[in-house]
Amino acid sequence: MSAEERAPADDEVARLEALGYTSEFKREMSLMANFSLGFTYLSPVVATYTLFALALATGGPPMIWWLVIVGIGQFLVALVFGEVVSQFPVAGGVYPWARRLWGRRWAWMTGWVYLIALLVTIAGVVYGAGPYLALLLEFSPGTGSTITCALIMLAVALALNMLGTRILAMAATIGFVAELVGALIVGGWLLLTERHQNLSALFDTEGVTGHSGGYLSAFLAAAIIGVYQYYGFEACGDVAEEVPDPTRVIPRAMRMTIYVGGAASILVCLSLLLAVPDFGAVISGEDPDPVISVLNSAFGVAGTKFVLLVVMISFLSCTLSLMAAASRLMYSYARDEMIFASHLLRHFDHKRHVPPYSMIIAASVPAIIVLGSVLSTKALTSIVSFAILGIYLGFQMVVFSALRARLKGWEPSGTFTLGRWGMPVTVAALTYGVLTMINIAWPRTPDAAWYDNYLVALSAVVGVGIGAIYMVIAKPYMRSNARWGDAVPDDSGGGTTSVSAME
């Protein structure tokens, strides 16, 4: 290594040591690879292909506007995260950010909520991939083949992730290129050759039934396609100790993830919408899988299989990124002795530079969720809805921490800051997030049993409740002398590493 290369690396080591850590990771992830990690986690193809039929049947073609609305809201959140990670470029994402902004208890609960949501999201992604992989492999359609294919996806993703950061970065980059090129080619071809609808359809609210609250109720329910689309940018920060010059690179990668991923998702959704010959057939349930119908019509059986191959690369890349994010969060948690079995979860493979046991958990828990889906008649919707609510709750716990810290005098000191726009952007991001969580959890099936109608909210309450009970009884936040609350230097215990001073 030359003197020029060694100096920045030494600066990064010194910066991390000043934050209280010595990293075991290798900084092998470039800006392009870091952005690709966020992009493949956000994955325009995965979210759109998974929920296109549901969103179209629920809210009709205007559901596409949720990709714009949510994109703007999540861009605000990404700006807040960019300020935080620029000052605290520590592996693990939301957990260490909440720890430095507020304190140990809040950080523990933030990490707990986000970890559960991440594991459920992994299950949702591979479950959503199941029918497409089954079709590609010519398995008989059904719950059994979907579960089998989901488990295959998990096994492949685990094997690739175990090979280390370099392979993860390479896989993320390949996934990004394949997904973006695929989205452009497939979307462009559909727009050129399969136009059955005019752009006026994007404003057509006719024909949507089943919502007593009128079209507004239907439109709000269709938001699921947008809110499921726009998270993944935080994964750029989960691997902060694997990125050279993270204070500059990661905030930029987060913003790129939002606007490049958002543009791609809008193209994918628009091309599919305009290629659907009969919206009424989808809304009535006569055409339950409009994506496959459109692809078969446009590309034929053989061409559809090629498209599905590109789609499966997107699903696999997304699973890889999610698994990497979950494993880094568990590692960060365990490094601070904040979770049970910390001695295993913080174990590090110095040959491949990954936390192997954290990675195994990141695959095993989603596998259990996928196997349990056999008990549910609406497994995909339930899994996705709970994952979204948990992710958004974890996000907003960090945003709320940032707002509290600002009110107590925190002035972001990283390379990336919002300056005088910091406070209004943080307030707007929090407002957007709270309203979105209310919409996600809102009961919309009044004819169903009460526990089914409130399933998403109840699942969140149970998840948070279990974490709160464990936190109160076991006091895991007391086990670590890592720094906390030092975003606000004058705050109680801020910046100290003394165990006695941490209560």
Image (spheres, rainbow, N blue to C red):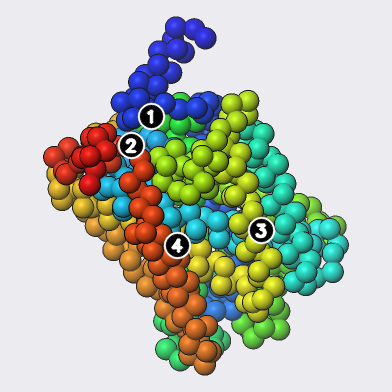
**Are the residues at dot 3 and dot 1 in contact (C-beta closer than 8 Å)?**
no
- Residue at the spot 68% in from the left edge and 46% down from the top edge: 157
- Report, in whole angstroms, how far the alpha carbon at label 3 lies from the one at label 4: 18 Å
- Report, in whole angstroms, how far the alpha carbon at label 3 lies from the one at label 1: 33 Å
Compared to residue 130, the image places residue 451 above or below, namely below
**Please, which residue is most extreme toward the top here?**
3
- For label 2, the SS is loop
What amino acid type is highlighted by mark number 4?
Gly
**Are the residues at dot 2 and dot 1 in contact (C-beta closer than 8 Å)?**
yes
- For label 1, the SS is loop
Question: Horizontal and vertical percent for residue 160?
Answer: 68, 40
| Image quadrant assignment for residue 246 | top left
- For label 3, the SS is helix
Q: How many discs mark residues in the rendered view? A: 4
- Mark sitting earlier along the chain (2/3): 3
- Report, in whole angstroms, how far the alpha carbon at label 2 lies from the one at label 3: 33 Å
**Are the residues at dot 3 and dot 4 in contact (C-beta closer than 8 Å)?**
no
What amino acid type is highlighted by mark number 2?
Ala
Compared to residue 1, the image places residue 444 above or below, namely below
Q: Nearer the viewer, residue 378 or 354?
A: 354
- Residue at the spot 21% in from the left edge and 52% down from the top edge: 404
What amino acid type is highlighted by mark number 1?
Tyr
- The residue that disc 3 covers is 367
Q: Is residue 189 visible?
A: no
- Local packing at callout 1 (Cα closer than 10 Å; few below 14, some 14-19, many 20+) is some
- Local packing at callout 3 (Cα closer than 10 Å; few below 14, some 14-19, many 20+) is many
- The residue that disc 2 covers is 482
- The residue that disc 4 covers is 390
Q: Nearer the viewer, residue 114 or 2?
A: 114
Q: Nearer the viewer, mark 2 or mark 3?
A: 2
